[in-house]
Image (cartoon, rainbow, N blue to C red):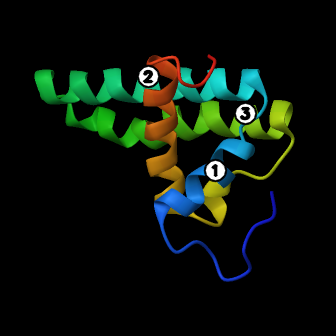
Amino acid sequence: MSVPTTGFSSFREFYPYYLSEHADRTCRRLHFAGTSLVLVMLATAVLTGLWALLWLLPIAGYGFAWTGHFFFEKNRPATFQYPFYSLWGDFVMYKDMLTGKIPL
């Protein structure tokens, strides 16, 4: 899928592109692992008051995701060009993997 030169006008328009950048199953699984770790760390920080854990969230989430992109998908993460849509896309893709809409 080609990327519009002017960007995306909505998340609905962006999400199919986002999914096309995650065709490799290992990449998707690494995204799933990273997002799961982020959610567990966030819950732990909120429940225990260990707010320093919040500093680790981007490392946990992006570390897994970028490993998937650089070593398995062999593409440039959408985060670099579309940071907010990409973050949103990660959570929507996570939900879609949890519900079986996208193979894990």
Q: Depth-wise, is mark 2 or mark 1 nearer the camera? A: 1
Q: What separation in Å lies between label 3 and label 1 (alpha carbons)?
A: 21 Å
Q: Which residue is mark 1?
A: 16
Classed neighbour count for the residue bearing mark 1: other residues with Cα under 10 Å, few (<14), some (14–19), many (≥20): few
Q: Which residue is mark 2?
A: 37
Quadrant placement of the C terminus: top right
Q: Which residue is mark 3?
A: 67
Q: What separation in Å lies between label 3 and label 2 (alpha carbons)?
A: 15 Å
- Amino acid type at circle 2 is Leu
Tag 3–tag 2 contact (CB < 8 Å): no
Quadrant placement of the N terminus: bottom right
- Amino acid type at circle 1 is Pro
Q: Depth-wise, is mark 3 or mark 1 nearer the camera? A: 1
Q: Secondary structure at mark 1?
A: helix
Q: Position of residue 22 (x, y in %)?
A: 71, 38
Instruction: Please give left or right for residue 5 compared with residue 51 in the image.
Output: right
Residue drawn at point x = 65 percent, y = 67 percent: 81
Q: Earlier in the sequence, mark 3 or mark 2?
A: 2
Residue drawn at point x = 52 percent, y = 75 percent: 9
